[in-house]
Amino acid sequence: MSENFDNSNAGGFNNDAPPQYPGVAEPHGNKPPNPNQQAYPSQPPVATQPIHTTTTIVSGPYGTVYRDIPVNVRCASCNTDIVTVVNHTFGVLTWLVCGIICLLGGWLLCLCLIPFCIPACKDVVHTCPNCHATIGKYDRLH
């Protein structure tokens, strides 16, 4: 029992191409584009200005920021490019924290001595490793 079954309109779908919309031109096919016609309007040329950059390198003890870490500077005493040696010394912050702990009763258990053991409470002195001259100082309270 073989029946001829027409599959062209199966499921209610029509396999024909949709109708053309009114006012729409037919596609060009394989025609080459017109050489006199521009695809996009031309843009005016963009004028570029030269870019000038200035880099300032500050060296020496007066322009350098001294903190907790060694810095690269030129020693004014021996005129050598060096990396400073960092030494921690007791400063105003160390004594201030010690005094506050004493006022709060920390003198009973000697807790007032803790700021003298913590580098974050001390001032930092930068020295030259060659001639041992003081290059700069970082005061914690200034």
Image: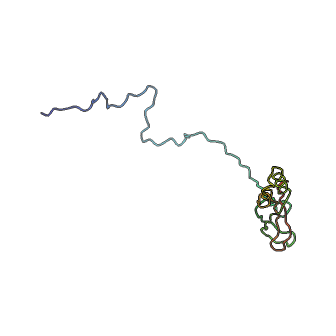
Decide: is 112 above or below 30. below
The residue that appears at 80% across and 66% down in the rendered structure is 87
Q: Is residue 82 left or right of residue 3?
A: right
Q: Looking at the picture, how far across and down is residue 72, in whole percent?
A: 78, 65
- In front: 37, or 111? 111
Decide: is 41 above or below 21. below
- Exactly how many numbered labels are in the figure? 0
Residue that lies at the very extreme toward the right in this rendered image: 77
The residue that appears at 40% across and 28% down in the rendered structure is 20
Quadrant hosting residue 107 = bottom right
Quadrant hosting residue 13 = top left
Residue that lies at the very extreme toward the left in this rendered image: 1
Colour scheme in use: rainbow
Decide: is 7 above or below 44. above
Q: Looking at the picture, how far across and down is residue 23, in whole percent?
A: 46, 26
Quadrant for the N terminus, please. top left
- In front: 17, or 90? 90
- In front: 47, or 54? 54
Q: Looking at the picture, how far across and down is residue 77, in whole percent?
A: 87, 71
Quadrant hosting residue 116 = bottom right
Q: Looking at the picture, how far across and down is residue 96, in whole percent?
A: 84, 54
Quadrant for the C terminus, please. bottom right
Q: Is residue 35 left or right of residue 90?
A: left
The residue that appears at 86% across and 61% down in the rendered structure is 62
Q: Is residue 120 left or right of residue 23?
A: right
